[in-house]
Structure formats: C-alpha cells, structure tokens
Amino acid sequence: MKDATPTAQLTSKDHDGAQRVLDRAVRGGGVPGILAQVRDGGEHWFGTAGVADRRTRRARGHEDRFRIGSITKTFTATVVLQLVAEGRLSLEDTVERWLPGVVNGNGHDGSTITVRQLLNHTSGVFSHTHDQPALCTQENYTSEDLVAIAMSHPADFPAGTGWAYSNTNYVLAGMIVEQATGLTLAEEITARIVRPLGLTGTSLPRTPDATLPEPHSTHYTRLFSPDPDATVHEATELEVSTFGAAGAMICTVDDLTRFFAALLEGHLLHPEQQHELLATVPTENWLPASTYGLGISRLTLPSGVQVWGMGGAIFGSWSYVYGTLDGTHLLAANINSDWTEGCWEDPTGLFTDLLEAEFCRTTDPGSA
C-alpha cells in the first residue's frame, strides 16, 4: 500500500525544532515534564524538558514508565486482527455471536453490531466513561460492569450510521478476545506483542493493581478541568479497571516507537489484516483533521503531511505516537499531566506542534 500524500523530510537528523517545542511546553505551556523519542531509520533521538517530580526536581528519563490511555486500543485491535488471520473470529462476526445478551437495551442491539464496528467506533455503543458518577460507586469494575453502565444509556445511533468515540467498544473487543481464546487480554498482548518485540516496559495491569512500575514520573492531574486554578492531584497510583482494554496499559517511549514501527512495517499482521487496520472512516468531534482505522488513526498536520498512530489521555498522563505510513520515522511523546495552558488550549495542540516540528522541517512551531 503506497502513501500518495506529502511525505516527511527525512534527510535531516536535526531535532532542534522538536526540542524547542519540548522546552516551550514547560516554559509557556505549564506542563510539569515532557519527554519524546524519535525513531528515524536506524537512528534514535531522545529529548526532555521539565521534571519528573515537582518535589525532587528529578529530570524525566528515557526509561520512565507512564500510562498510555487510549493507545491501549492499538494493542487490543492488533490482537483481534491476529485472531482474524488465524480464522478464530471474523470482523463481520456480531457482538451477539461472542457475547450473547450482553449488548442489549436502550437502542443497543448486539446482533446488529460487528467486531469491525467496535474497532472503528461506528457501533453506536454509548461510552461508559461519559457516566463518571457511575464510575465512582465501587473500588474496581469488571468489564461486565462497564458494559452494564453503557447499556443503561441510550445508544448514540444505530450501528453503522455514524461515528462516536466509545471506550466501551474496546472493553467489548477485549471481552471477545477472551471468549475466543480462553486467555486474558493481558496474556494475549504479552504473548503476541510484548514478548516477541522485547517490550520490557510494557504491561496491561491486572486489577486491582494501581501501582506504576519503577522508574516512572509522578503523574499530575487536574481531573481534566480547563480551569488553570483547578486543584492539582497526584495520580501516579491509579486504579484502572474503568479503562481496561480501552486505556489501561503502561509503556515507555522506546516501546511505543518499537511497537508502532513493527505494526506499520507489516511485521505483526498479514497483508489482508494490515489493509483492514488502515481502512479509515471520518471522525466527528475528535482530533482535528483525523480519520480512524481499526485502533489507529491518520492525522493530517497543518503542513499537509500525514502521520499514522494514536494518542491517549488518562488522569495525569497524555501521550502521542505517530509516524510515517511505512513505519520508518516515528515520534512518541508523553507529558506527566493532563493539561496545558498559555500556549495551547489543550495537549492536542502541543502534540500537533511537536509532530509538525519533527515531520515537516520547512516550518518550526517550536520557534513561535
């Protein structure tokens, strides 16, 4: 599959523009700390700014673990597509086929929703994370609990008639993986992705484990409040059962670029499933200038360059990993907060500027 869109300028190994964006994120964007890694062919570059911990003033390190939020979806989708290649399930299977009676009520009908529609967010399933009060009633949640919360709300639209980002879609996808294999999603991700690629800093925590393995930065959260005077809380220890297959994983920048390089280069999927992975649909009310495939997205940067990858936000941590379609040039970055201020209204603007600085060398957002 060839990319006919503008390609990134890969001739220069100068990452000064990206470093200026990192510095600006701390100096003008109010971010406690930021780190980034570029994987460009056989060469790597690592940059950082700010601190890992506001009390000790320790710098962020290359080996720091952090929570990757919705980038978890790419791992989950990859496992599903591998199972499709093995003939153990189909993208056209209905949810009812694998989870009888689970998706039902308030306009939800599992017999009309396919696995593909879960993965590309065209299912219409309400996202349980939109009901925060329901997620504060117990210490931890099973996947069945999360789906039940979603079913208590009206469906967003009939399956296949719209697009809406729903974390419940991936909770259901994880449940289908477990039904199809008899193993946990964590075990499947470890056996199929983590161990073969040597991702030593990557894991899907088992609930109720709220710890973050060392080394790590302190995660700071304003609970996604846009108020610059909002109280800042520490969220390094976080019970993540409310996110599960949709957003609970932990990773490092090196592991993220290694995984996405292998995925985009076609090392993890057969050609037919690779084509399915990259078949995108338009998004609504999500990332600007984006389309969405199966657990992966395509962004068109302001320069016109297109990059492929995924972003993820969770309390105290916001991450992006995007790169060229052939997987040869990638950037992964993380801030240990869930806000920006001053220069950017939210972290998506920061990461867009960082991607622009790395993948389009004719402009330099870092100098603004």
Image (spheres, grey):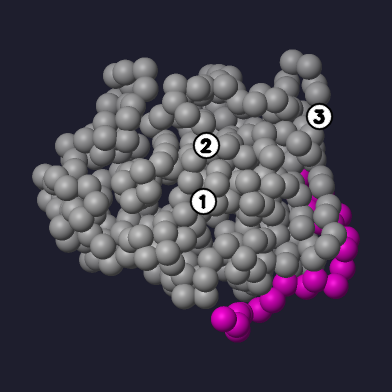
- On the image, numbered disc 2 is attached to which residue? 204
Q: Nearer the viewer, residue 248 or 344?
A: 248
Task: Report x, y in % for residue 169.
Answer: 33, 49
Q: Quadrant of the N terminus?
A: bottom right
Q: Nearer the viewer, residue 259 or 21?
A: 259
In this rendering, the answer to whether 234 lies above or below 59 is above
**The residue under label 2 is which amino acid type?**
Leu
**Crowd rating for badge 2 (residues with CA inside 10 Å; few <14, some 14–19, many 20+):** many
How far is disc 3 from disc 2 in space, using C-alphas? Answer: 26 Å
How far is disc 1 from disc 2 in space, using C-alphas? Answer: 10 Å
Marks 1 and 2 in Cβ contact (< 8 Å): yes
Q: Is residue 21 left or right of residue 124?
A: right
Task: Report x, y in % for residue 202.
Answer: 62, 40
Residue interval drawn in magenta: 1-27
Task: Report x, y in % for residue 326.
Answer: 66, 72
**Crowd rating for badge 1 (residues with CA inside 10 Å; few <14, some 14–19, many 20+):** many
Give residue 341's quadrant in the image: top right
**Residue located at (82% from left, 47% from top):** 46
Instruction: Give the secondary structure at mark 3.
Output: loop
How far is disc 3 from disc 1 in space, using C-alphas? Answer: 29 Å
Q: Is residue 52 left or right of residue 251?
A: right
Q: Earlier in the sequence, mark 3 or mark 2?
A: 3
Give residue 182's quadrant in the image: top left
Task: Report x, y in % for residue 332.
Answer: 68, 51
- On the image, numbered disc 3 is attached to which residue? 59
Give residue 364's quadrant in the image: bottom right
Q: Nearer the viewer, mark 3 or mark 1?
A: 1
**The residue under label 3 is which amino acid type?**
Ala
Residue 162 in sight in this render:
no
What number is the disc on residue 329?
none
**The residue under label 1 is which amino acid type?**
Phe
